[in-house]
Amino acid sequence: MIRLLLVLLSAIALNAGLSLPASAQSNDDDHSYINGRTDEQLLAMLDDYVKTDSRTWSYNRYAAGSMHDIEVTRRGGRVIRMQASYAYDGFMGRMLGWVEMDIEWNGNTALYCITYHDYPDTCRPIRDPY
């Protein structure tokens, strides 16, 4: 219950452009239920997805390798939601945003949809520029 509350508070804070103090964040970094992947491996995967998708962005430019502060929750069997923060260059210079992805995990990954902070009500397929 406490873990769920911390995840919800983190999501609300991220939507408001805030972050929770370290003392209020969860210390549960064991996401072994995702086939033993570490947070670093999951961040690298999210980085790859956003790097590919960002090639289709009109103006903003993704700061590759800036993905951090991952939160992972399992919902509905094999469907997993991951949210992380990242940096990008836009009209106002270097900015921070968040991305949320719904992924089916069954040994291989299958991305369902991706949601960005600037369109929080739109979960869309990843765009591949090629």
Image: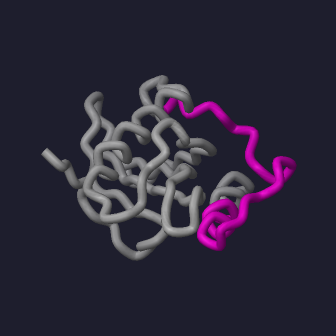
Vertical placement of residue 93 versus 128, above or below: below
Q: Who's the residue at 69% across and 52% down the image?
A: 3
Vertical placement of residue 111 versus 96, above or below: above
Viewer-closest of 80 and 39: 39
Left or right relative to 106: residue 18: right
Q: Where's residue 100, x and y in %?
A: 45, 56
Q: Where's residue 19, x and y in %?
A: 73, 59
Q: Quarter of the image holding residue 18?
A: bottom right
Q: Is residue 11 magenta?
A: yes
Q: Where's residue 45, x and y in %?
A: 40, 35
Viewer-closest of 80 and 67: 67
* Residue located farthest toward the right when viewing the structure as drawn: 23
Colouring chosen for the image of the structure: one colour
Q: Who's the residue at 31% across and 64% down the image?
A: 58
* Residue located farthest toward the top when viewing the structure as drawn: 36
Which stretch is magenta? 8-33
Viewer-closest of 41 and 58: 58
Left or right relative to 65: residue 52: left
Q: Where's residue 96, x and y in %?
A: 59, 58
Q: Who's the residue at 62% across and 31% down the image?
A: 30
Quarter occupied by the C terminus: top left
Q: Who's the residue at 53% across and 42% down the image?
A: 67
Q: How many marks?
A: 0
Quarter occupied by the N terminus: bottom right
Left or right relative to 94: residue 2: right
Vertical placement of residue 67 versus 34, above or below: below
Q: Quarter of the image holding residue 31?
A: top right
